[in-house]
Image: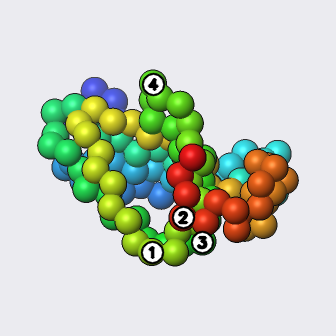
Amino acid sequence: MFESSPPPVPADAIMVAMSRQSYVERGPVPSLAELVSTVWIQRVPASSSAYTQRNLPNGTVEIVCEIGAVPRIAGPRTAPAIDFLTPGTTLIGIRVQPGAAGSLLGVPARELLDLSV
């Protein structure tokens, strides 16, 4: 039996936990809601094997940062893609609201199509 219970998951959080990775998604703070639709964190435990991340095209722009690396901008995808996340990887991401890439990044989403910069 546990001494204390784990904290409850907020109602606005979506969590996917598997033996090889975890993913938590939340809405942004109210002051960013016009520009940001979602913030998320994905972790691959150091003790697990590499994780194959399958990405489907969803028409969104994301700012993604692996802990310890330079952030990158991922433009809207027009085709599925596969990324391999190594053990110990932690990614933090911000999904931009449709139509807000120009205001937030100074570049329209169409110029980022299928790019990761």
Q: Residue at x 47, y 44 (%)?
A: 41
User: Left of 106 or right of it: where is 15?
Assistant: left
Type of the residue with mark 4: Gly
Q: Residue tagged by mark 3?
A: 59
| Neighbours of disc 3 within 10 Å: few (<14), some (14-19), many (20+) | some
Query: Distance from label 3 to label 4 (Cα)?
Result: 27 Å
Query: Distance from label 2 to label 1 (Cα)?
Result: 8 Å
Q: Residue tagged by mark 1?
A: 79
Q: Nearer the viewer, mark 3 or mark 2?
A: 2
Mark 2 / mark 4, whichever is N-terminal: 4
Q: Position of residue 14 (x, y in %)?
A: 48, 58
Residue nearest the observer in this picture, 58 or 17: 58
Looking at the image, residue 95 lies above or below residue 89: below
Query: Distance from label 1 to label 4 (Cα)?
Result: 28 Å
Type of the residue with mark 3: Gly
Query: Distance from label 2 to label 4 (Cα)?
Result: 24 Å
Q: Nearer the viewer, mark 1 or mark 4?
A: 1
Query: Distance from label 1 to label 3 (Cα)?
Result: 10 Å
Mark 3 / mark 4, whichever is N-terminal: 3
Residues under numbered marks 2 and 4 in contact, where contact means CB atoms less than 8 Å apart: no
User: Left of 84 or right of it: where is 111?
Assistant: right
Q: Is residue 97 visible?
A: no
The disc at residue 114 is 2
Give the image quarter of residue 43: top left
Give the image quarter of residue 2: top left
Q: Is residue 109 visible?
A: yes
Mark 3 / mark 2, whichever is N-terminal: 3
Q: Position of residue 92 (x, y in %)?
A: 50, 40
Residues under numbered marks 2 and 1 in contact, where contact means CB atoms less than 8 Å apart: yes
Q: Residue tagged by mark 4?
A: 68
The residue tagged with tag 1: helix, strand or loop? loop
Q: Position of residue 91 (x, y in %)?
A: 44, 40
